[in-house]
Image: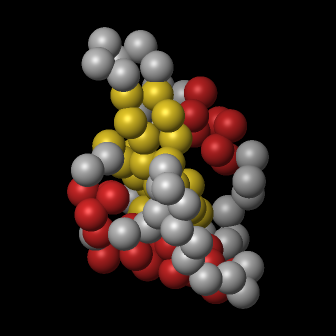
Amino acid sequence: MPVLREISDAWLGSREAREKSFPVAAFTDDYLTAQSVLLVRQQGKPVAFVTFTTTDLSTEATVGVMRHQPARRRTQWNICLRSSRCI
């Protein structure tokens, strides 16, 4: 959890924003522990994460919270979510 918090805090800080709580997703310990988390590493260092929930048959997924280190490109999400290397 501390790694995810570090990434989230850096992401929020880069936008001069605070955490927003939506009915569906929010960065809280309770929410994150109830979700699946995909952690992206570059050269062994965690740089981004996304939470998701799957259907009972695991045929569909819903994305919850997506955060990345500010220095990372936004296009990395497209690459990550389409790549089996990230899953």
Q: For the point 37% across and 28% down, which residue is it?
A: 54
Image position of 83 with respect to 10: above or below: above
Q: Quadrant of the N terminus?
A: bottom left
Rendered image quadrant of residue 11 = bottom right
Taking depth in this image into account, of 45 and 10 the one nearest to the observer is 10
Say left or right for 5 vs 9: left
Single out the residue that lies furthest toward the front.
Answer: 23
Work out whether residue 44 or residue 17 is closer to the camera in this orientation and state it: 17
The reply, left or right, for residue 62 in relation to residue 55 is: right
* Viewer-closest of 41 and 60: 60
Q: Could you say which is closer to the camera, residue 74 or residue 43? A: 74
Quadrant of the frame with the C terminus: top left
Q: Where is residue 36 shown, x and y percent of the image?
A: 32, 43
Q: In the image, what residue occupies the spot 73% across and 79% down?
A: 15
Residue sitting at x 72%, y 86%: 16
Q: Is residue 87 left or right of residue 48?
A: left
Q: Is residue 17 left or right of residue 63?
A: right
Residue 13 in the image: above or below residue 56? below
